[in-house]
Image: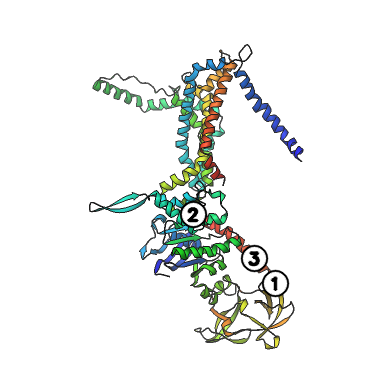
């Protein structure tokens, strides 16, 4: 009996070994070897020059995750609280963009944010730049400032802001859905019990709903943070050469002119370790609540 | 039992145009154990939610100590609730669950410089400790402070829910089918436990159940409800001995309900025979429902009987036998400690106090015939099961 069961598991074991374990092992091996072959720690030393990229990647991912949380939690809360009709409509609206190709969506943002893009053309049409220039001119003559008075467009594309926007836009559903599913499962009488025991709506939220929804928040944060910190498509399309993130750095080591798979592997490995460490700390933090929801 | 505490005046409630409460009039006394009893969908949970402040009646008044409370939210009433499935907070341990209400800052009015100012005030930690531990002792859960909720049995969770409500020292405790999820044995234990707690704390309990035995065992007053209306209010003895209509007679205990004609005071006719009874005040020759409790019938040899019937089924029930006897096509349930085999012809004697007369009502002819005996019992089992499920749904519907 036991043998038969392990026989059924065999395809999965082979699959995991081939496509999960082996690549990670390869990354580890490459990270610790030099181009000529042979073990070395040189790759990690070389990486030191890129600490700005590390910092920027984590910074933007944290910002994007925070924005997703701030936008996503209220939406999830409304979806769980309102009637099924609102919930259905909201689910479709959230899922709809995800049925389109990821790159297509991001290209669409490019043409919106470009210097001659949709938004800037709109601003120009409503004469926003004339207004800005006039105000700047007035301020210049009043206070002796030196503000530019010939603004023709706002620089939106190729900024960190655009990259964060792209992350939020693409990954927001990953924040909303786990939080929503935890909130929707929550027994409504818990809220009534809190109210019955004297809690105001705000206190009931803070003392009961928020702590009980933490597991959903944690998995939402994980699901937004991890792809955000490792993205390269969003940063390349919306950030251009101005916003280089870890994903672009790694990509460069494998496809660019500075071909260096050993360094690329080392960067990947370090990023992986940092991400796993972050997740571990967060999950330890939420462990108590996790049990509560399993109840 | 003290003075009047709560009064509902002509309370009506409807959801989506469907009337669920129809002019409920009811008063509840201080320190009373009052039970709202009825089948699922009868409006008992809705009535409880109106008292608790979770639902506002579409018409009528809710009075606490004579003050109108219709729009006062739950936490501003001196009422706490024990919920159907306890609704304990899974992220808090037993102590923190019980302390929940005490940790909420209360608005108090204070004299300061000759003016009264409203200020939010927290209870000192020491007082919280004392009150929680004291309450855990009342519900026999001393030493369980640090347990997590999911580590407790159903009965223990029940006790935490009661302690959590009582620690706020409410004047009234509302209990919504609190024993529904417990097994029979535990339920019996908790019945006497609840009664003890109620007497020890000296407060009013308003209890909702569909279990008539539970209601009879615990209540000072029972309110029997069906189809959004109060069918009868009275002590357990009143309800059992003097049911007002066929519904109450059938819902509380077992009853044989026959068609009869009231000839004059103290004289009723059924099965073409006149019987003496203790009821009066009916119109001459008024058609009535006659209730005869299965345990009140005396079986005698045929020649001594007022009526003669044939035994058609016997079930052993432990203390007694459920004997089904056919009287001219109408089957009675008779409970006796003597065994009478199927096919035996027996006589019965009814004493005047065994007979209870009721006015005809919309429920006449619906209950009290044991012709389909075996099915009726199956059906009753189903009803109990359905009841529990349906009541859950009822409660959820209410929330929307």
Category of crowding for the residue at label 3, using alpha-carbon neighbours closer than 10 angstroms: few (below 14), some (14–19), many (at least 20): few
From the viewer's perspective, is residue B172 above or below residue B277? above
Question: Residue at image x 39%, y 23%?
Answer: A154
Mark nearer the N terminus (3 vs 2): 3
**Camera-nearest residue between A110 and B185:** B185
Asked if one can make out residue A184 in the rendered structure from this viewpoint, the answer is yes
In which chain is the residue bearing label 2? B
Mark 1 to mark 2 CA distance (whole Å): 43 Å
Asked if one can make out residue A223 in the rendered structure from this viewpoint, the answer is no
Mark 3 to mark 2 CA distance (whole Å): 30 Å
* Circles 3 and 1: CB atoms closer than 8 Å: no
* Circles 3 and 2: CB atoms closer than 8 Å: no
Task: Report x, y in % for residue B186.
Answer: 58, 60
Q: Which mark is residue B379?
A: 3
Task: Report x, y in % for residue A109.
Answer: 48, 27
Question: Which of labels 3 and 1 is toward the front?
Answer: 1
Question: Residue at image x 49%, y 84%?
Answer: B281
Q: Relative to A90, is A38 on the left or the right?
A: right
Tag 2, which secondary structure? helix
In which chain is the residue bearing label 3? B
Q: Which mark is residue B399?
A: 2
Task: Report x, y in % for residue B145.
Answer: 50, 50
Question: Which of labels 1 and 2 is toward the front?
Answer: 1
Residue carrying label 1: B315
Q: Relative to B374, is A177 on the left or the right?
A: left
From the viewer's perspective, is residue B100 above or below residue B192? above
Q: Relative to A49, is A142 on the left or the right?
A: left
Tag 3, which secondary structure? helix
In which chain is the residue bearing label 1? B
């Amino acid at each position: 009996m036991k043998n038969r069961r392990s026989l059924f598991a065999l395809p999965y074991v082979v699959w995991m070994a081939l496509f999960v374990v082996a690549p990670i092992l390869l990354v580890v091996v490459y990270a610790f070897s030099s181009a000529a072959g042979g073990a070395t720690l040189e790759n990690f030393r070389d990486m030191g020059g890129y600490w700005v990229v590390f910092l920027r990647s984590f910074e933007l991912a944290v910002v994007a995750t925070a924005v997703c949380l701030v936008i996503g939690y209220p939406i999830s809360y409304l979806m769980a609280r309102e009637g099924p009709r609102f919930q259905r409509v909201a689910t479709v609206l959230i899922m709809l963009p995800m049925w389109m190709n990821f790159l297509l969506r991001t290209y669409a943002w490019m043409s919106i944010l470009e210097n001659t893009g949709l938004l800037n053309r709109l601003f120009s049409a409503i004469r926003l730049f004339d207004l800005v220039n006039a105000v700047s001119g007035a301020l210049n003559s009043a206070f002796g400032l030196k503000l530019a008075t010939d603004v023709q467009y706002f620089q939106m594309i190729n900024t960190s802001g655009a990259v964060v926007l792209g992350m939020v836009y693409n990954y927001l559903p990953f924040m909303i859905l786990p939080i929503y599913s935890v909130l929707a499962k929550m027994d409504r009488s818990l809220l009534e019990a809190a109210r019955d025991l004297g809690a105001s709506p705000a206190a009931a939220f803070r003392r009961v709903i928020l702590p009980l929804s933490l597991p959903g928040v944690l998995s939402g944060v994980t699901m937004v943070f991890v792809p955000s910190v490792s993205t390269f498509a969003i940063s390349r399309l919306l950030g251009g050469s101005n916003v280089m993130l870890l994903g672009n750095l790694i990509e460069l080591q494998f496809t660019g002119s500075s071909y260096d798979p050993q360094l690329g592997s080392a960067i990947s490995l370090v990023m992986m370790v940092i991400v796993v460490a972050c997740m571990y700390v967060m999950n330890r933090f939420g462990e108590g609540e996790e049990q509560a929801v399993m109840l | 039992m003290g003075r009047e505490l709560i009064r509902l005046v002509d309370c009506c409630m409807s959801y989506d145009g469907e009337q669920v409460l129809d002019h409920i009039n009811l008063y509840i006394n201080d320190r009373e154990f009052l039970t709202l009893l009825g089948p699922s969908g009868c409006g008992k949970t809705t009535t409880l939610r109106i008292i608790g402040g979770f639902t506002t009646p579409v018409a009528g008044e809710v009075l606490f100590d004579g003050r109108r409370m219709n729009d006062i939210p739950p936490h501003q009433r001196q009422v706490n609730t024990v919920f159907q499935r306890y609704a304990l907070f899974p992220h808090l341990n037993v102590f923190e669950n019980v302390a929940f209400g005490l940790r909420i800052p209360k608005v108090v009015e204070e004299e300061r410089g000759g003016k009264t100012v409203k200020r939010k005030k927290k209870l000192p930690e020491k007082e919280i400790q004392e009150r929680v531990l004291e309450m855990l002792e009342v519900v026999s859960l001393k030493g369980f402070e640090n347990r997590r909720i999911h580590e407790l049995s159903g009965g223990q969770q029940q006790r935490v829910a009661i302690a959590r409500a009582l620690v706020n020292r409410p004047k009234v405790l509302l209990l919504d089918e609190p024993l529904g999820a417990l097994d029979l044995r535990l339920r019996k234990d908790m019945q006497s436990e609840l009664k003890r707690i109620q007497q020890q704390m000296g407060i009013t309990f308003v209890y909702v159940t569909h279990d008539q035995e539970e209601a009879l065992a615990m209540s000072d007053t029972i309110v029997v409800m069906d189809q959004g209306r109060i069918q009868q209010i009275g002590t357990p003895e009143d309800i059992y001995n003097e049911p007002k209509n066929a519904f109450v007679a059938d819902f509380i205990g077992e009853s044989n309900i026959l068609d009869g004609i009231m000839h004059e005071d103290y004289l009723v006719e059924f099965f073409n025979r006149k019987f003496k009874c203790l009821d009066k005040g009916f119109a001459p020759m008024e058609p009535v429902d006659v209730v005869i409790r299965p345990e009140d019938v005396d079986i005698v040899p045929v020649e001594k009987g007022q009526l003669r019937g044939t035994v058609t089924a016997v079930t052993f029930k432990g203390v007694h036998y459920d004997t089904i006897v056919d009287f001219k096509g109408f089957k009675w349930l008779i409970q006796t400690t003597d065994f009478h085999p199927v096919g035996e012809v027996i006589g019965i004697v009814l004493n005047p106090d065994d007979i209870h007369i009721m006015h005809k009502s919309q429920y006449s002819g619906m209950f009290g015939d044991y012709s389909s005996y075996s099915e009726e019992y199956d059906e009753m089992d189903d009803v109990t099961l359905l009841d529990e499920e349906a009541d859950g749904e009822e409660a959820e519907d209410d929330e929307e």
